[in-house]
Amino acid sequence: MINVISNLKQINLGKKQDNLLSKLLILRSRVRKQPIKVKLMLIIMLTSLICLLLTGVTVIIYERYHIKRDLVKDVSALAMLIADRSTAALTFQDPRLAEENLSALHVKPAIEAACILNEKGEVFARYNSMDLGKLNFSTVGKSHGYRFADEHLLLYEPISLGDRPIGTILIYANLREFYNQRFYFMLLVAAIILFSSLIAFYLSSRLQRVVSRPLQQLTRTTQLIAVKKDYTLRAVKHSADEIGILVDAFNDMLVMIENQNMSLKDSAELYRTLFENTGTAAVLIEENTIISLANAEFEKLSQYSKQEIEGKKSWSEFVVKEDLERMQAQHQLRREKNETAQKQYEFRFIARDGTIRDILLTIDVIPGTKKSIASLLDITERKLVEMEIKALNAELEDRVVRRTTQLEAANKELEAFSYSVSHDLRAPLRHASGYVDLLVKRCQSDLSDKGKHYLDAIADSVRQMGVLIDDLLQFSRTGRTELRKKDTNMNEILAEIMAALRHDNPDRAIEWTVGEMLHVFCDEAMLKLVWVNLLSNAVKFTRTRKNAKIEIGVHKENGEHVFFVRDNGVGFDMQYAHKLFGVFQRLHSMEEFEGTGIGLANVRRIVLRHDGRIWAESELDKGTTFYFTLPLHKEVKT
Amino acid sequence: MSDLKTILLAEDNPKDVELTLEALAEHNLANHVTIVKDGVETMEYLRCEGTYKNRKKGNPAVLLLDIKMPRMDGIEVLKAIRSDPALKMLSVVMLTSSREEPDLKKCYELGVNAYVVKPVDFTDFIEAVKQVGIFWAVINEVPPEGG
């Protein structure tokens, strides 16, 4: 029980302390909320008041001590004076004289009573009807002394004759005067404190401005900046103290903010301009799919104004139903794991009036945000063109296939034709030749000379027909067979052909001049045919010359190899040059120079199939030069 | 010349047959020539089938084979011979009017032993047939029988 009670007491005590503490805390927080101006004044006033009060208390204490000492001194001087005068009265036992002496005490109204005690301590004389019973004489010593009691001063002074004490004088004085004096003094001090406080208040209210005004101005500037967002404003510096430094620092910060604002504005301007002028529609898409920024191109594309789009429309409103699911899946991916999202894909865009456009979308998340920036390229026309091209290509391919089939069929027919020519046309010829020969051999005796001549003519025609068929077949083959191009050494081909020609014409003395030939990318067998024809022609048409000269050479000209074969043969009239390369065209009679008229047609066909050209320059009786070209880029370095 | 083996001539054109025989006769080779008129007959002869069921067994020394023949042409005959184990070693010489490259290529691919184009000129023709006849029927050693 006892413990519980003591505990309760402690709790009560604790509560009281808590109350006080909480009140102090409230006060502190209230003070803290006050403006600096008030705080400064509070500090000054508090300090002044404490100083004044301390001074006042000190002065009062000091004054009280002095007043008391003066009172004691005054009364003691009076007592000594009366004691001095009362020696005789005591010696002569004259109380009337003593009382007369005491009556001089009336000059000091504070003295309420006095008495003179004789040697034995009995009252010898008294002043005023004072109740001396109140006084405790036992405490009165034979020597000088005083004490305060009951708001009175009791002072005693020995009366001596020579060295012998003969009595004591007692003075009992009230302290009213002293109290009065003390009251007035305190009043004065209070008045001074009050006055000083007023002065302090006035001065503090004036002087605090030195500190508070620049701070107030600074605060006002900051508030103004906060409200207006105008970072060009500056705080005014009034002093070079800490506040001045603060103002400088604040202004420096403002300059920095202003610069940063400018560069921010610049870059925002730059990006805005870029955004507007990419040439494609572009939008900024928030995480919730709302378009927060759109450019003019997007306005054009969507047929909505920026005001209608920005912050209001979701991009999904512009996607056709069929593509929406895929777009939303991509959007989700972009939000969760951007790297896996597709950065570019096509979708169909639906404009305000319902028109649908094909769009190539390029989209990516802005780093550090959930926003996406998207650019939309209208590829509707491109797709149309693509489709057209595709259709055209398909048609073209179709046509090519058809033509190829036709060509192949024609080629097959031609092949079949030449095949049957080679088999079926040659067989009757062979038979004719065979039977003519047999006739001549077996029935020679039955034949007249004329008959023999006829048979010779038949045999000759048959032979000629055979050569013609062979040449024609050759000509047809050079047109049909596939070129088998390879690196071909022209020197070797020429050497081979020249050897054969020399062998076939052993009685001919021909002066050959052969320039250095090169390697050419061509069908070797066909090129051989070209050289055989040209060279055998040259040999044939110089037959009538005593000093036959044949020159072969090559030079490069305009990206081509230009080969030539020059002879000093019979030549031909240039007005017939156009007939030179035609099939069965001949510029000489069979009697003069034999031939089928297919050789040069064949040569021309081969040269053309090698992307070359062929021509001849000639002068009757002077000689002929054949030229043919082959493309230079087909040349292979050896 | 009794040990001379037979020359089998596959030729549909009687004029060609006559002229070829004339040419062979000039070199005393005509008596050993057997003539078949087309590819089918050629194969019947070689396999001793049909009309030739009862002929004396044994492959000819050489088959002179024309390409253009009715029913089964020369190239088909060549193919059949080369894929027949009993005939594949038979010497086959194409004797034809054609000098077409595809034919040449096909024949050599099928393993022909020679390819001769009949010259239009009869003198040349006789020379060619003579050369072929002598070489294949006289000079050349035939492969072992049944190999």
Image (spheres, coloured by chain):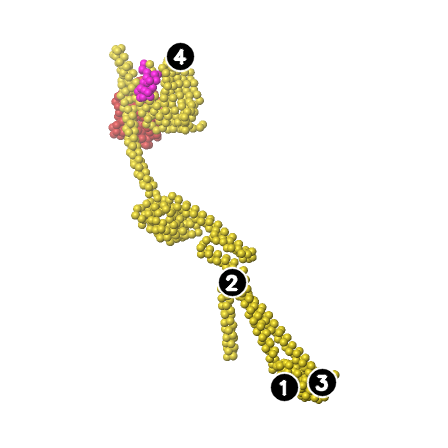
Chain colours: A yellow, B red
Q: CA distance from mark 2 to mark 1?
A: 65 Å
Q: Nearer the viewer, mark 1 or mark 4?
A: 1
Assess disc 3: are there few (<14), some (14-19) or many (≥20) residues with their C-alpha within 10 Å of its C-alpha.
Answer: some
Measuring from the top left, give residue A511's x and y in whole percent. 42, 16
Horizontally, is A193 left or right of B77 in the view? right
Residue in the picture at 28% in, 20% down: A429
Are there few (<14), some (14-19), or many (20+) residues within 10 Å of tag 4?
A: few
Q: Earlier in the sequence, mark 2 or mark 1?
A: 2
Which span is picked out in magenta?
A572-591
Which residue is under mark 4? A546
Between discs 4 and 3, the one toward the N terminus: 3
Residue A573 falls within the magenta-colored stretch:
yes
Q: Amino acid at mark 1?
A: Asn
Q: Which residue is mark 3?
A: A87
Q: Nearer the viewer, mark 2 or mark 1?
A: 1
**What residue sits right under mark 1 in the picture?**
A128
Q: Could you tell me the amino acid type at mark 4?
A: Lys
Q: Indicate the chain on which mark 1 is placed.
A: A
A308 and A212: which is toward the camera = A212
**Which tag, 4 or 2, sits closer to the chain's start?**
2
Front label number (3 vs 2)? 3
Q: Is residue A86 above or below residue A190?
A: below
- N-terminal of the pair, mark 1 or mark 4, is 1
Question: Dot 1, how many residues are within 10 Å of its Cα: few (below 14), some (14-19), or many (20+)?
Answer: some
Identify the residue at horizontal 34%, vertical 43% (top origin).
A379
